[in-house]
Image (cartoon, rainbow, N blue to C red):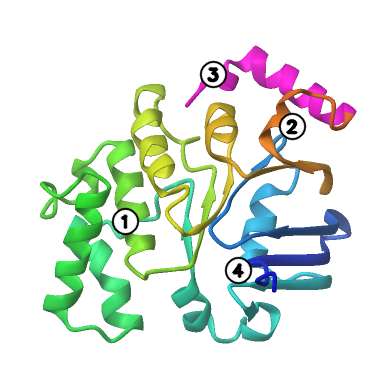
Amino acid sequence: MTPPPAIEVRGLSKSYAGRTVLHDISMTAAAGSCTVLCGASGSGKSTLLRCLNGLEHWDAGTVRVAGLDIAALRTRPQRIGRAIGMVFQDFALFPHLSVLDNVALAPRRLLRIGRDEAEAAALGWLRRVGLGELTSRMPRALSGGQQQRVAIARALAMNPSVLLFDEPTSALDPEMVGEVLAVMRDLAGSGITIVTATHEMGFARACADQVVLLAAGRVCACCGPEAFFDGREAPEVAMFLSRVLRSGRQTAS
């Protein structure tokens, strides 16, 4: 028997002030797979991710993630937070907490884990992202790439089965992009279901099981990376890839 998908979106539509930002979106993602969402700014990638973890209301359609009916659980965000991790573009670390406390806080508050156990687990995740030596640092003392890796460790500390990334490298200086993508490459194929909005097409080519192209809130293409990068899946794909090549993001890895 085929296992159910980790993510299943059917007929998802959403409008802001009368403007449709997601139009009849349908997609699935298998457990343990890596899905890359791409498209121009304003195409609906971030809104889709925020629907997947219940941060946004929507007008029509269904969203199931990690076996959860997200609409039914929007009033119980703790239940969603136990299954779905989110890494934001702007890091969203608590500036008054140390690196270790940023990572250990959610397990202590949401999972009711004791301080010693939570901090030991947090140290393990920080070592996983290459920051085991910086546990006592404050976020302001870290580079952008280090802050984003702390944010990834914080999301992982809840042991989610699904991990969402919203443009995780777009706020970083070019020299820091590689260190974050290295962590993401390590996570891809680790058993966690990953969905990431990104313009880093080298990552998509190397790590994605499927690539979804959004344009004006619609799915223009949803296919494996080989079919996507040959540019023949849809006219919109060829146009998007030509823009990416001009920007230099095609070769990022």
Kindly identify the amino acid type of the residue bearing the numbered disc 4: Leu
State the residue position of label 1.
153
Q: Main secondary structure of the magenta part?
A: helix
State the residue position of label 3.
251
For the residues marked 3 and 2, what is the alpha-carbon distance in whole angstroms?
A: 15 Å
Kindly identify the amino acid type of the residue bearing the numbered disc 1: Ala
Please give the name of the residue rendered at 14% of the width and 68% of the height, measured from the top-left corner. Answer: 120
Pointer 1 and pointer 3: residues touching (CB < 8 Å)? Answer: no
Specify the label residue 122 is tagged with.
Answer: none
Q: Is residue 75 above or below residue 230?
A: below
For the residues marked 1 and 3, what is the alpha-carbon distance in whole angstroms?
A: 26 Å
State the residue position of label 2.
228
Query: Closer to us: mark 2 or mark 1?
Result: 2
Q: Position of residue 22 (x, y in %)?
A: 81, 55
For the residues marked 4 and 2, what is the alpha-carbon distance in whole angstroms?
A: 29 Å
Q: Is residue 251 magenta?
A: yes
Q: Secondary structure at mark 2?
A: helix
**94 left or right of 77 in image:** left
Please give the name of the residue rendered at 16% of the width and 69% of the height, measured from the top-left corner. Answer: 119
Q: Position of residue 197 (x, y in %)?
A: 60, 44
For the residues marked 4 and 3, what is the alpha-carbon distance in whole angstroms?
A: 32 Å
Kindly identify the amino acid type of the residue bearing the numbered disc 3: Thr
Residue 220 appears in view:
yes
Q: Which residues are magenta?
A: 235-253
Specify the label residue 55 is tagged with.
Answer: 4
**205 left or right of 176 in image:** right
